Image (tube, rainbow, N blue to C red):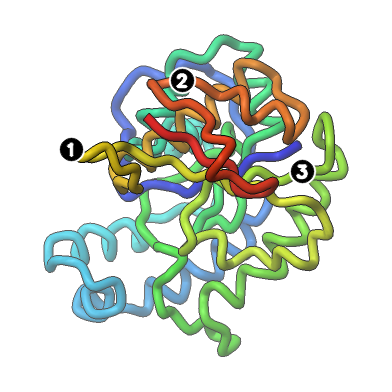
């Protein structure tokens, strides 16, 4: 069983590392091609392409200019400890024990606009390139199309070697999961939904809370070595409980 999550815009390259272990991304050649494309863009181009502020555009132009195709602990950081957004606050990988990192390497994957598909300990350098960016590569493909086949092939191989049932737990956003050619994987895909009750007691998705809940579930799957889709309904962390009446087989709903 494999779980996928999205990356984060917020990065942390300063905090002490919870592990010295690392691996090298498996699609670095493709990443280097994208970096070459982005190096041809001016800060103004990046601002327009990514729809970001001038400050963020200038920062990322510098990041692409400084990007080193060779990833080492001196210039990079394990992905699961470099991303620092809401999902990763829920994941809280800085608290993982050694065996948790080992389990995460087997069962967790991160979808990425620049790296395609990352294992938790794969080294990454500071960057921002969202999967939904309307970037056309030198081969004429948009970013999601360019990555789609590569990501899907790698996911299929990882699913074959992952422990437990052949199930993909989708905890990624629609933007990132859209790059996966889901039908071609030929496995069951389970997409949990997280809702919070409003002042009237009506459950609804609150983006901030749902993102953090995805990370919390990913951590729960890792800590508990979950190996089957049926066991997912046992998730009861951060105040969420399974709602069987509003759930379907492949779309379990959790409410708090």
| Residue occupying image coordinates x 66% and y 12% | 99
Residue 77 shows in this picture: no
Q: Residue 86, percent across and down?
A: 33, 38
Q: Which mark is residue 167?
A: 3
Q: Tell me whether circle 2 and circle 3 mark residues in contact (CB < 8 Å).
A: no
- Of tags 1 and 2, which is closer to the observer? 1
Q: Nearer the viewer, residue 2 or 21?
A: 2
| Residue occupying image coordinates x 44% and y 30% | 81
- Of tags 1 and 3, which is closer to the observer? 1
Q: CA distance from mark 1 to mark 3?
A: 36 Å
Q: Tell me whether circle 1 and circle 3 mark residues in contact (CB < 8 Å).
A: no
Badge 1 is on which residue? 199
Badge 2 is on which residue? 237
- Of tags 2 and 3, which is closer to the observer? 2
22 left or right, relative to 173: right
**Around disc 3, counting alpha carbons within 10 Å, would you say few (fewer than 14), some (14 to 19), or many (20 or more)?**
many
Of the residues under marks 2 and 3, which one precedes in the sequence? 3
215 left or right, relative to 168: left
84 left or right, relative to 70: left
Of the residues under marks 1 and 2, which one precedes in the sequence? 1
Residue farthest along the right direction in this orientation: 160
């Amino acid at each position: 069983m494999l779980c996928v999550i999205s990356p984060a815009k917020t990065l942390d390259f300063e905090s002490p590392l919870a592990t010295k272990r690392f691996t090298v991304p498996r699609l670095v050649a493709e990443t280097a091609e994208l970096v070459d494309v982005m190096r041809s863009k001016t800060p103004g181009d990046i601002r327009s392409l990514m729809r970001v502020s001038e400050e963020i555009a200038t920062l990322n132009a510098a990041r692409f200019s400084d990007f080193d195709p060779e990833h080492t602990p001196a210039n990079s950081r394990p992905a699961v400890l470099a991303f620092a957004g809401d999902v990763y606050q829920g994941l809280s990988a800085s608290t993982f024990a050694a065996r948790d990192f080992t389990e995460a390497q087997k069962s967790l994957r991160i979808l990425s606009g620049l790296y395609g598909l990352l294992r938790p300990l794969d080294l990454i350098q500071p960057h921002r390139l969202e999967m939904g960016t309307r970037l056309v590569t030198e081969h004429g493909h948009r970013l999601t199309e360019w990555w789609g086949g590569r990501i899907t092939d790698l996911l299929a191989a990882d699913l074959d070697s992952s422990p437990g049932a052949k199930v993909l737990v989708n905890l990624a956003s629609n933007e990132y999961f859209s790059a996966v050619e889901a039908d071609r994987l030929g496995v069951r895909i389970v997409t949990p939904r997280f809702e919070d009750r409003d002042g009237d007691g009506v459950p609804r998705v609150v983006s901030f809370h749902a993102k953090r809940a995805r990370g919390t579930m990913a951590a729960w799957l890792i800590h508990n070595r979950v190996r089957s889709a049926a066991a997912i309904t046992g998730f009861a962390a951060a105040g969420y409980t399974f709602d069987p009446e509003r759930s379907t087989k492949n779309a379990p709903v959790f409410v708090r």
